[in-house]
Amino acid sequence: MADRIPVRPDLAGLEPYGAPQLDVAVLLNTNETAEPPPPEYLDEVARRIEALQLNRYPDRPHRLLRETIAAQTGLTADRVWAANGSNEILQQLFLAYGGPDRRVVTFQPGYSMYPVIAQVTMTPLAPVDLAADFTLTGAAIDAAVDADGDVVIVTNPNNPTGMTVGADAIRELHERTRALIVVDEAYVEFGGDTALPLLAELPRLAIVRTFSKAFRLAGLRLGYLLAQEWVVEDIRRVRLPYHLDAIKQVAAVTALEMRDAFLDHRRRVAEERERVAGRLGELDGVEPFPSSANFILFRVADPGGVWQRVLDGGVLIRDFSDKPRLDGCLRVTIGTYAENDAFLAALEAAL
Ligand code: PMP
C-alpha cells in the first residue's frame, strides 16, 4: 500500500496562493495600512473578551455584528453577512453560485485570488480583457455580456491597477446580463465611489468589503457582504456553522463602534500616494499608473531585477510582471512617510 494518496488531480498543479512573506524592514507588498489600530482599541477589546463565555459556541448568525454593519450602511441585518476575510465571502459566493455547470466572468488584469477560488470550487472562469488603459469600458463590457456568466466580478478600485469603475458600467453590466454582479470594494474607502446607493436599484447586485485595508485590521481576518436578502440566504447554505469565532465578533463590533478613529488615516494615505506617484513620474524609465487606492502600479524595463534590488535595499514590493497584461509591472503599497522615502531611495538605486 502507498503511504499517501494523491491530491485531487485538478489541484495537482496549484501552488498555495500568497504573496511572499519575507523578513524585511519595510513591507509594502500586501496593501495593508501601515498605521496600527488606535491604542485604546485593544484595551476595549480585551475588556469585552473577558465577558465572553468561550466554553460555548459563538452566536452563529453573528447578529450583533451584522446589525452594527447594517446600521452603518443604511441596510437591514438580513442583507448583511460577514466571514473570515473578503476572500471567504468570495469563496462562499463561488460555492453558492459557481460550480462545474456555472461560469464566472472576471476582468484582467485583476485580483489573483479569483482564479484560485474558481479552480478550487471547480467553477469555469471567463476572464475578459480590460481596455488598453485598464478601464472597464466599451469593448470590455460587450465581451463580459457575451461571456454570459452566472456571476460577474467587478473590482472597484481594481487591484493591482488602482483604477476605478463608474456606476454606469455597473448599471450596464446589470442591465445587459442575467448575472449576479459582485462589486469587490476592498479598497473603496481610499477612493472611487461605493456601489451602495445602487443596491436600491439593482436587484442582482452584491458588494464585498474588508477590514484588511483602510480599516487597518488585516490581522483580524474579517470581510462582509451587502446584498439582497436572498444572497444571504443562499450563502447560509454553504457556510460552515460557527464560522466566525466569538473573539472576532467582539473585536469587529468594537472596531465599527470606533469607525472614525480607524479611518482617520485615509487623508494621509492619499497625500502620500500623490507624493509617491509624483516622484515615480519624474524617474527615467518608470511609468506609474493612476491610482485611487492605497497602492501604485508602475512599469519598468527589468522588473525582476528591480524587484530584487529594491528588496536588497530593505523594501519588499510586489512583482506582477508574470501576470496577463502586466509585463514589466511592479506594485508598491503606500506606507508611512519614512517607509515611502525608503522605497523611493531603494528604487532610485535599483534603476
Ligand atoms: N479583494 C481584493 C481586490 C483584494 O485585493 C483583497 C486582498 N488583497 C481581497 C479581496 C481579500 O482581502 P481579505 O480576505 O483580507 O479581506
Image (cartoon, rainbow, N blue to C red):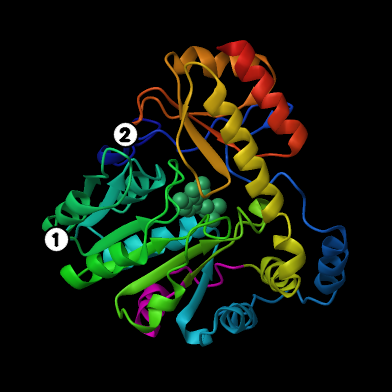
Q: Residues within 10 Å of mark 2 (few under 14, many from 20)?
A: few
Mark 1 residue CB less than 8 A from any atom of ligand 1? no
Q: Which image quadrant for residue 6?
A: top left
Q: In this view, does 142 lie to the left or right of 240?
A: left
Q: Quadrant of the N terminus?
A: top left
Q: Name the residue under label 1.
A: 148
Above or below: residue 273 compared with residue 349: below
Q: Which amino acid does label 1 sit on?
A: Asp
Q: What stretch is highlighted in magenta?
A: 226-244
Q: Which amino acid does label 2 sit on?
A: Ala
Give the residue displayed 28% in from the left and 70% down from the top: 171
Q: Which residue lies furthest to the left in this view?
A: 146
Mark 2 residue CB less than 8 A from any atom of ligand 1? no
Front of the two marks 2 and 1: 1
Give the residue displayed 59% in from the left and 77% down from the top: 69
Q: Mark 2 points at which residue?
A: 12
Image coordinates for residue 229, horizontal then vertical, percent: 40, 84
Q: Nearer the viewer, residue 318 or 166?
A: 166
Q: How crowded is mark 1: few (under 14 residues within 10 Å), some or many (20 or more)?
A: some
Q: Does the magenta stretch include residue 240?
A: yes
Q: In this view, does 309 lie to the left or right of 208?
A: right
Element under disc 1 = loop
Q: Which image quadrant for residue 308?
A: top right
Image coordinates for residue 177, horizontal then vertical, percent: 17, 68
**Is any atom of residue 137 visible in this view?**
yes
Give the residue displayed 35% in from the left and 37% down from the top: 5
Above or below: residue 135 compared with residue 81: above
Give the residue displayed 38% in from the left and 76% down from the top: 198
Q: Nearer the viewer, residue 241 or 19?
A: 19
Q: In this view, does 202 lie to the left or right of 67?
A: left
